[in-house]
Amino acid sequence: MSFVRLIGAEARLIARRSYSSSAPTTKLFIDGKFVESKTNDWIDVKDPATDKVVTRVPKATPEEMKTALESNKRAFKSWSNTSVVSRQQVMFKLQALIKANMGELAKNITKEQGKTLVDAEGDVLRGLQVVEHCCSIPSLQMGETVANVARDMDTYSLVMPLGVTAGIAPFNFPAMIPLWMFPVAITTGNTMLLKPSERVPGATMLLMELLNEAGCPPGVVNVIHGQHDAVNFICDAPEIKAVSFVGSDTAGKYIYERAGRNGKRVQSNMGAKNHGVVLSDANKENTLNQLAGAAFGAAGQRCMALSTAVFVGEAQKWIPDLVERAKKLKVNAGHVPGTDVGPVISDASRKRINDLIESGVKEGAKLILDGRKITVPGYENGYFVGPTILTDVKPNMKCYTEEIFGPVLVILNADTLDEAISIVNANPYGNGTAVFTTNGAAARKFVNEIDAGQVGVNVPIPVPLPMFSFTGTRGSFRGDHHFYGKQGIKFYTQTKTVTQLWRETDVNHTQAAVAMPT
Ligand code: NAD
């Protein structure tokens, strides 16, 4: 196994213990070591395709969380003084190790999260791109200088780390989202206490093995597991200066408020309802394929999934063709070659999705493709929902007002582009949106007038690469600085502005200068 060959002797042993079926517990990662928790409280992680337990995740005890935080505090003293090029070197090595172990990481993601192997590789790749961006840290973390702000006086700014930071991640991107967090936090000189989703801890643990192998010192990143108690610990610990969160609205608002009340910086990426607006002058084939991929790919469990389509005018005639494309998608276990749509994360999630579909029907929407009763031969216990399409949806229906987070596309109609724009702008979320058109003026109008943070023009899922930032807005985000890119660097750093006077012959002031210097 390529993964095991690349890691050190100790981690190799742990990898075998952690991920063999005979001892399915997930460890904590504290001070560079994988540690068995002493808790009595465990959470089962089940393979969504089979309903079988893959691993058991501990709810870390208060002592374990304190130990982890102490380790982060200790490590900060030396790590923040490590040269920027040493931190860059760790990223270069991590980058190579992630690439070499892409397959292993993807397999783990498919097993715990359910998405297809190809999609799981994409999950790793989009996180890897953040690591690659962090390799430029010496130039990303540069301050500014103005010489001669007064006679013999210069002012310059230093971009300094904050201290111990924390990351709280969701289930839907087990590799990408932890990789939005810890690489940026640590290359800027911070340490990080990371809490991956208790539903998909494996990718983070594999990344920690790689981080060890890349030469990152113990305590720079520690990993605790758990749910509310771990989140509260992070929000309340005075030593933690900043919290990065990605997940649902409920948790995101709670964390933003609780950690904010405790004086921490918080960036909170939350839910979404992304609209694809289809104009009748669009390239039909391309648009319908893009729409089907973006609505049903990853079983709709992407925060940038196009879960809502607004067909404008004559484009409404294309809806039956969209249904035909959706019907062709193969629903199966994520590791089966050729699968397009894997299971959703849990049985509870499947029930929630099915209930929201039913609510749409009861409120008057038309269910023109129903994926609720699907069975997958060989995986009868899996949590599958097939591609589902509801048309004639109105903005007051529950299937529209709530994030479904499943392979369900809700379709609204509009007579004009203006009407479509008002529908999108009236929705409380602002993560992403897309317009499909061949008319440059219409596209330009859409880009200018639409109130969403990430806009695609003939691009269905416009997630920016890390030279930009992930800029969801309105109900999808709370905070001041976004994840990764220049804003990510800003989030994890503070500015120290130095004004210095050096003069060959010292000035002899005859009395104290009490007036404001000008
Ligand atoms: P979630 O909120 O249930 O879990 C995220 C994290 O918060 C987990 O680590 C979990 O342990 C913790 N948590 C859960 N409930 C909590 C609560 N009540 N109080 C405090 N902490 C809590 O989210 P999820 O179901 O894992 O992820 C799916 C959600 O994440 C969707 O809403 C999706 O849109 C959103 N998401 C947003 C983005 C984005 O960038 N905007 C990206 C990915 C996912």
Image: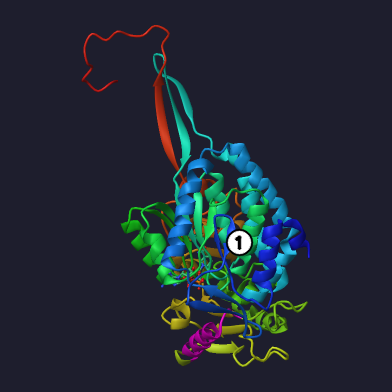
**Is 286 left or right of 507, judged from the image as shown?**
right
Q: Which residue is mark 1?
A: 176
**Residue in view at x 72 percent, y 69 percent:** 118
**Is 429 left or right of 302, judged from the image as shown?**
left
**Residue in view at x 73 percent, y 90 percent:** 378
So how many labels did they put on this image?
1
Q: Residues within 10 Å of mark 1 (few under 14, many from 20)?
A: many
Identify residue type, mark 1. Met
Which picture quadrant has residue 513?
top left
**Where does the image place residue 150, in percent across and percent down from the top left?**
38, 17
**Is 265 left or right of 373, judged from the image as shown?**
left
Camera-side residue of 38 and 482:
38
**Is 70 left or right of 295, judged from the image as shown?**
left
451 w.r.t. 299: above or below: above
**Residue in view at x 66 percent, y 42 percent:** 89
Which SS does the magenta portion mostly show? helix
400 w.r.t. 158: above or below: below
441 w.r.t. 20: above or below: above
**Where does the image place residue 441, in percent across and percent down from the top left?**
58, 56
The answer to whether residue 96 of the structure is visible from this angle is: yes
Quadrant holding the N terminus: bottom right
The answer to whether residue 283 of the structure is visible from this angle is: no
Secondary structure, mark 1, is helix
Quadrant holding the C terminus: top left
Magenta-drawn stretch contains 47: no
Magenta-drawn stretch contains 345: yes
**Where does the image place residue 269, in percent across and percent down from the top left?**
47, 62
Write down the region rendered in magenta.
344-361
**Where does the image place residue 425, in percent across and percent down from the top left?**
44, 66
Camera-side residue of 414 and 424:
424
Camera-side residue of 107 and 35:
35
Camera-side residue of 404 and 460:
404
